[in-house]
């Protein structure tokens, strides 16, 4: 609310030139640059873009950039109309007359286009196109990109991210999506996917573990084997964490195994070195508590009691458990008898009391 007097004072100050312009201390100017073209980027990397063999592949790659770099704008009709150009690019990479760097980049682009297409059911239902996608993705699974970098691996363990397109990452992602729609081809692709699942680069393995649930119904033992490997043996915390989440989502099929995996992960990262390992440990504790609260699983109940009572348990573990179960305390209808909800609420409330008793 502004009074008439205040407006008058403001007008007089403006007429006297006594009002200073208010400017923010920090301004973000719009970016006025441009994304370098493929040719410009390759030339900066020392590639002779004027060599005839290189020019041919570059001319085929440029129109493919939208399929590779803008997956959210992928359009099926445009993809189908561009198939002849994609096939021509594929054939050019096989002839291998261009420099190695350009061939690698061409394969990255091809793999990204194929991976994006593999997400679309109606595309993969076309046997002829599906065969082409499969050929490209299998070829990309042998690609040189991405290269192993210890610093990148450490950063991935803290917070997963990667740059692209990159052949083996696209291959891992694309083949798993491909099998969503063409499960009959699992046996013939299993060896290739198993290799990608043990790739030296975590970002490649990540594409497999993120999609394990796609195949759980048809291949439960295969999914189980990979989940156990990632949880028990993988050295990257991000992969361990996603294996843990996979186990949690299928826990109804085997509570004992889920408990085994979660306790193993908790012990692996009992003294976390960074945020990624700490997230693994805290989520492992939540999963075990879920087995106790939702399923009344005896071993989980005992484990939770021991952890909450142990002097070495960090306060963050108790804090996260309290936060996780805040809504469960009021789960179900409170104004009427509910034989299913009441025991669940009771076990969640019991956790609250254990934590309160410890810190009171």
Image (cartoon, rainbow, N blue to C red):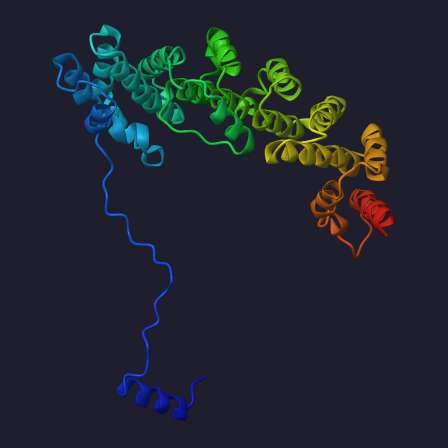
* Picture residue at 21% right of the left edge, 31% below the top: 37
Q: On the picture, is 261 further left or further right than 237?
A: right
Query: In the image, is 344 to the left or to the right of 72?
Result: right
Percent from the top left, x then y, of residue 184? 48, 12
Asked whether 154 or 160 is in front, the reply is 154
338 to 55, vertically: above or below: below
Q: Residue at x 71, y 37 (%)?
A: 286
Location of residue 239 in the rendering, given as x and y in whole percent from the top left corner: 57, 25
**Percent position of residue 235, x then y:** 60, 20
- Tell me residue 355's x, y (percent): 82, 46
* 342 vs 18, nearest the viewer: 18
Please state which of residues 150 and 90 is positioned toward the viewer in this rendering: 150
Would you identify the image quadrant in which residue 314 lies?
A: top right
Nearer to the camera, 349 or 95? 95
Image quadrant where residue 347 sits: top right
> Considering only vertical position in the picture, is 175 above or below 35?
above
- Image quadrant containing the N terminus: bottom left
| Total labels drawn | 0
Compared to 134, does 59 lie above or below? below
User: What residue is rendered at 39% in x and 29% in y?
Assistant: 163
Tell me: 292 left or right of 99. right
């Amino acid at each position: 609310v502004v009074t008439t007097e205040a407006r008058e004072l403001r007008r007089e100050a403006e007429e006297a030139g006594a009002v200073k312009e208010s400017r923010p201390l920090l301004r973000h100017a719009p970016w006025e640059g441009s994304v370098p073209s493929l040719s410009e980027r390759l030339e900066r990397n020392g590639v002779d873009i004027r060599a005839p063999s290189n020019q041919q592949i570059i001319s085929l790659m440029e129109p493919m950039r939208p399929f590779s770099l803008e997956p959210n704008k992928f359009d099926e009709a445009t993809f189908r109309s561009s198939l002849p150009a994609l096939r021509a690019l594929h054939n050019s990479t096989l002839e291998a007359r261009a420099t190695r760097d350009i061939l690698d980049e061409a394969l990255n682009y091809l793999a990204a286009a194929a991976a994006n297409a593999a997400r679309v059911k109606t595309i993969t239902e076309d046997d002829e196109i599906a065969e082409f996608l499969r050929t490209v993705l299998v070829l990309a699974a042998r690609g040189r990109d991405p290269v192993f970098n210890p610093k990148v691996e450490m950063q991935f363990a803290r917070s997963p991210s990667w740059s692209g397109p990159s052949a083996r990452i696209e291959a891992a992602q694309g083949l798993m999506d491909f099998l969503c729609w063409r499960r009959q081809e699992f046996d013939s692709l299993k060896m290739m996917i198993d290799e990608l699942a043990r790739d030296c680069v975590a970002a490649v393995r990540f594409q497999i573990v993120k999609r394990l649930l796609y195949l759980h119904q048809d291949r439960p033992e295969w999914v189980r084997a990979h989940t156990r490997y990632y949880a028990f043996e993988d050295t990257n915390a991000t992969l361990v964490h996603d294996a843990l989440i996979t186990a949690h989502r299928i826990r109804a099929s085997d509570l004992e195994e889920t408990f085994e995996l979660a306790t193993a992960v908790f012990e692996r990262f009992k003294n976390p070195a960074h945020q990624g390992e700490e997230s693994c440990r805290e989520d492992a504790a939540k999963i075990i508590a879920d087995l106790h609260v939702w399923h009344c699983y005896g071993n989980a109940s005992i484990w939770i009691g021991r952890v909450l009572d142990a002097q070495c348990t960090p306060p963050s573990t108790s804090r996260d458990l309290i936060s996780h179960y805040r809504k469960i305390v009021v789960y179900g209808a409170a104004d009427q008898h509910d034989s299913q909800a009441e025991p669940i609420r009771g076990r969640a409330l019991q956790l609250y009391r254990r934590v309160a008793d410890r810190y009171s």
